[in-house]
Amino acid sequence: MTAQLGEPDNLVLQARDVRFDWSAVPLHWIPGDPVATHLINVLHMLLPAGEEWFVRVFKEAVPLIEDDDLREDVLGFIGQEAMHASSHDAVLDHFMEQGLDVRPFVRQVEFLFESMLGDRGLTGDRRRAWLNERISLIAAIEHFTGVLGDWILNATALDEAGADPMMLDLLRWHGAEEVEHRHVAHELFMHLDGRYPARLRAMAETVTALVSLWQRGHRYLMAADPIVKGRIKGGVRHIRRTGRAGLTPEGRMVAASIRRYTRRDYSPLNEGSTEQALAYLATSPAAQAALR
Amino acid sequence: MTIPPDLYGRRSRDRFVIAASALFSGLYRLRTLRTPTLPPVRPVDRSMRLVVQAVTQVAEEVVSLTLAAPDGRLLPAWQPGSHLDLHLPSGRRRQYSLCGDPSDLGTYRIAVRRLPDGGGGSLEVHGLSEGTVLKVQGPRNAFPFIPRKRYLFIAGGIGITPILPMVKAAEKLGADWHLIYTGRTRATLPFLDELPDQRVTIRTDDTDGIPTSDFLLASATPGTAVHVCGPSPMIDAIRAALPADATLHYERFAPAPITDGKPFEVELKSSGRVLQIPATRSALDVIKEEKPDVAYSCRQGFCGTCKTRILSGAADDRAPSDPAGDNTMLICVSRATQGRLTLDL
């Protein structure tokens, strides 16, 4: 059936008005596996501040775009990212209610995005250059959100492990929209700047930042978890086990995707499947509820 | 913003953050010793000039337009659900669903119903003659069609346009499908002759009355993908009555019509210009004409992208995600309670 229709193309990107009810979601939403649960939970702490930053940077870029289709894509992207940020923020409130205080780590993430990567009060060409640099970082980060989105859509091991369906729907709705708009940040960077060394530098900075954020974030969650109480020490080394079990992505898979990103002819469209993303969105309880 | 405290309450300034911040800022300063070079941004024009090859009356008040490249070259491929953006000679821009055959890359076909009380776009299309050249953008798809085992298509009148290629694709896929096609009278329904004999129910108001949602959704069994295109009251009725185990698909590009809107004025701080917002249009719509780079996204008041600071005046904050009393408003839906608003734009 797939071959006859072809991969959907030229989609109009639109935000979906989703809502989630967290009240019945357990703290360890992958039952009996706080290590894997918190490896994914690091995302919830990074995304609200991170995606709000995407929105601010992209809003600043809109007036510079000289391509009608790309401008439409960027506007659709902004709305989707804004919904992602607010949806993950609600998960953090739920963590707080269950006695997991995420505020110290979130404060550091906010410092990263609002201060280190924030507006530097520049003008003229310097302002443009700093904007381009931040767009190159977003393009690199969006490479990972696309790869992770594709991964979560195919992560059947999470269903088999009995992961909470509401949480899976949040992650897969988000992942599917990341796959749906995976080309936008890269195309925006190529339109406004496009230099290859800048892409490589952005990827190197992004990998460094993500590895340290994950390491510190996971350690923090394992220490602050009111059930685990620091009995298991957190850290990214755990993905050797969780990756093999299919509960998180595998290091090798991520490394291979980075090698693809560093090719000059990289295209995000070769990562993941729009058709699969749309098929998920067509049946996602949250995305369906938004249409009714 | 000051350096945040240590994660475990040991220090008031986190050492890792201090180091990371110093490293990043140091690298940044080093790079900015050189004057930045900015590659030029090359404008991209993806629009096409297409010639109206044929104007055909396909039903009462409905014409179809066949568009082709003047030199006969192949057109960009499209999938069911896609639409074109037409720039009409008057400057109006209108979007119309493609209703031809996706495997024919030589021509596009759209169909337009004449709406005497509309915004004038349909009357203009009806007045076009063969040989006219139009600026066209697209195709773009806001109503993607994906493989499923069972479909129920519901088309109201001219809403058949995106549905027709879907019906043909479902037939080709060998899917189990059913089409309900409604309208005022049989003579107003285009493309009846292109529909298969089987699996199609035609229902017209003049002989059968206005269809109920129970009738429209009778075959929406569990797992059915219900694709709807038609007037908004029809879509609303289906949204309200859809069984929980079927899925709904409709084109979402049009924001909901404005209810109880009153005209008001908006003053833009940057230019001092005062814009008149009529009762039937949103502030965003009018502001966009004045400031084409204003940021917005969902146009339905939920994503928050167009949130704008109010410098004077009061807004009705009518969207659920537009909290009252915070001196901001979502310009895509919210309106002035009275008189004039001065906005930080």
Image: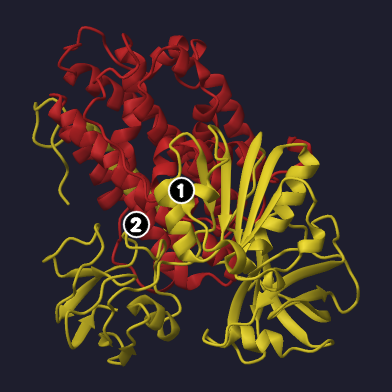
Residue B222 appears left or right of B195:
left
Find out whether the residues at labels 1 and 2 contact each other: C-beta distance under 8 Å. Answer: no
Q: Amino acid at mark 1?
A: Leu
* Display colour for chain B: yellow
Q: Which mark is residue A290?
A: none
Tell me the mark number nearer the camera, choosing from 1 and 2.
Answer: 2
Of residues B190 and A173, the one drawn nearer to the viewer in this rendering: B190
Callout 1: few (<14), some (14-19), or many (20+) C-alpha neighbours within 10 Å? Answer: many
Q: Which mark is residue A137?
A: 1
| Residue A82 picture location, percent across and down | 35, 52
Answer with the quarter of the image where residue A121 lies. bottom left
Residue A230 appears left or right of A285:
left
Question: What residue is disc 2 on?
Answer: B303
Q: Residue at x 61, y 65 (%)?
A: B207
State the colouring used for the structure image.
by chain
Tell which subunit mark 2 falls on. Answer: B
Q: Residue at x 74, y 88 (%)?
A: B128
Q: Amino acid at mark 2?
A: Cys
| Residue B319 picture location, percent across and down | 26, 63
SS for callout 2: loop
